[in-house]
Amino acid sequence: MSHSVHFPARGRTAVVSCTLLVIALGTATTACSGDDDPLAASPYDAAGRVSFNGPTEPGKKADPDKPLEVVAEGSDGRITDVTAMDATGRYVAGELSADGARWHSTSPLAADASYTVRVSTEDGDGAPGRKVLTFDTGRPAAKKRLDVVFGPDKGTYGVGRPLTAELSMPVKDPAQRKTVERALKVESTPAAEGAWHWVDDKELHYRPRDYWPAHATVRARSTLKGIKIGDRLWGGTAKPLQIETGDRVIAVTDASSHTMTVFRNGEEIKSIPVTTGKPGFETRNGVKVVLGKEPFVRMRSTTVGIAEGSSEAYDLPVHWATRVTWSGEYVHAAPWSVGSQGSANVSHGCTGMSTGNAEWFFDTVREGDIVEVVNSYGDTMETFGNGFGDWNLDWKKWRTGSALTGGNPNGPAEQEAPRLRPTAT
């Protein structure tokens, strides 16, 4: 890790030039050692030429959460080098501005540590200056707390609804991710093997290997409170979550046969003629999860990038709309296409059916139920970001997103370590 930046002083150039003169002429040594040579004198005390934002009063301690800054005072000098180091020999990385006017730390200071900062300067004539600064750090003025919010809200959901954990701040470090993930506990009755998957630095999803058991109770809780996650990051609060699952309802749409088959707890309960996306607007393949239900939606083509007035433009009142993606894919009533339902794909990506069938489907499914599309020429449903496409990753790939099993998705998850025990703060 780089801890200092060096800028050559003009005085050093003079030394090289004088050396060359001595070698070439063997004379004129007095010209290089006279009183006018800025390097001949001892470095001056640069106390009046630099300032820093650390404490100056006896007994006063610096907040380690605040970066260190050294600034050149006046217009006739500049900083050429800064070295900051604690009593154990650990350097502090920093950056010096191109004009030498300011240096600031780029790595964090440690808490309860003693630091020595050595500052090198030069004045307008190139004469070197030195200043040594010392200070101590205290405990952080305010520790950062990592809070967790579990989702969804309390209620009853379909067997495909993943759990979510939203973090109050990003966690990027692999070791810190392990600490966080170990503390996020999920239990279900009946039991189901599952794993967390890091969607990004602030969001995790939890799902079982297969869907949740029907009529299960699922609980999520965090044991992070009081746990040290990083240098100044500690576990905060999280409200426990409990949800229930309903029947195992799975609707499978075959885009090639233009039929949706609905199963409840493994038994077929209805077969529905449908139409899916036409060429250029093919319905996404893969597993989707019901996100919500809207008795009435006004659907406009402009919301999906189709220009108003074009041959594909539309502005329609739609009833019994069951949403499966955030970008606007629904299962809904489409009375205008009844003649094509069961025989052709004519929609702009949604799954259309008669008004009666759409109302039945609307009343039968709940948030979290599964809607799967097969044999479409469309792309596969996005895994994240457009709803819950989590189930489109096989179990091995899903486990690679866990901080505890990512390096060995076929092996067991790492067990809770003793360092997870709460630490006094």
Image: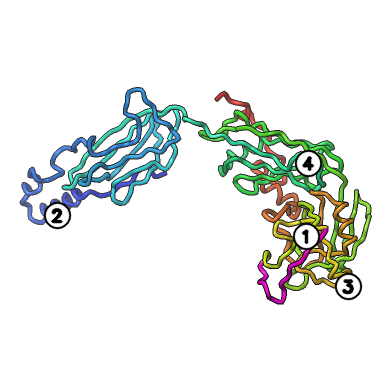
Amino acid type at mark 3: Gly
Q: Earlier in the sequence, mark 3 or mark 1?
A: 1
Q: x, y percentage for residue 21?
A: 11, 54
Asked if labels 3 and 4 touch by Cβ distance under 8 angstroms, the answer is: no
Q: Left or right: 100 with respect to 421?
A: left
In which quadrant of the rendered image does the C terminus lie? top right
Label 1 residue SS: strand
Asked if labels 2 and 3 touch by Cβ distance under 8 angstroms, the answer is: no
State the residue at coordinates (71%, 77%): 311
Separation of marks 1 and 2 at Cα, in angstroms: 82 Å
- Residue segment shown in magenta: 305-319
Magenta stretch: helix, strand or loop mostly = loop
Q: Earlier in the sequence, mark 1 or mark 4?
A: 4
Amino acid type at mark 2: Leu
Within 10 Å of disc 2 (Cα), the crowding (few <14, some 14-19, many 20+) is: few
Residue 313 shown in magenta: yes
Label 4 residue SS: loop
Residue 31 shown in magenta: no
Quadrant of the rendered structure where residue 419 is?
top right
Asked if labels 2 and 1 touch by Cβ distance under 8 angstroms, the answer is: no
Within 10 Å of disc 3 (Cα), the crowding (few <14, some 14-19, many 20+) is: few
State the residue at coordinates (81%, 42%): 156
Q: Is residue 265 above or below residue 130?
A: below
Amino acid type at mark 4: Glu
Q: Which label is found at residue 20?
A: 2
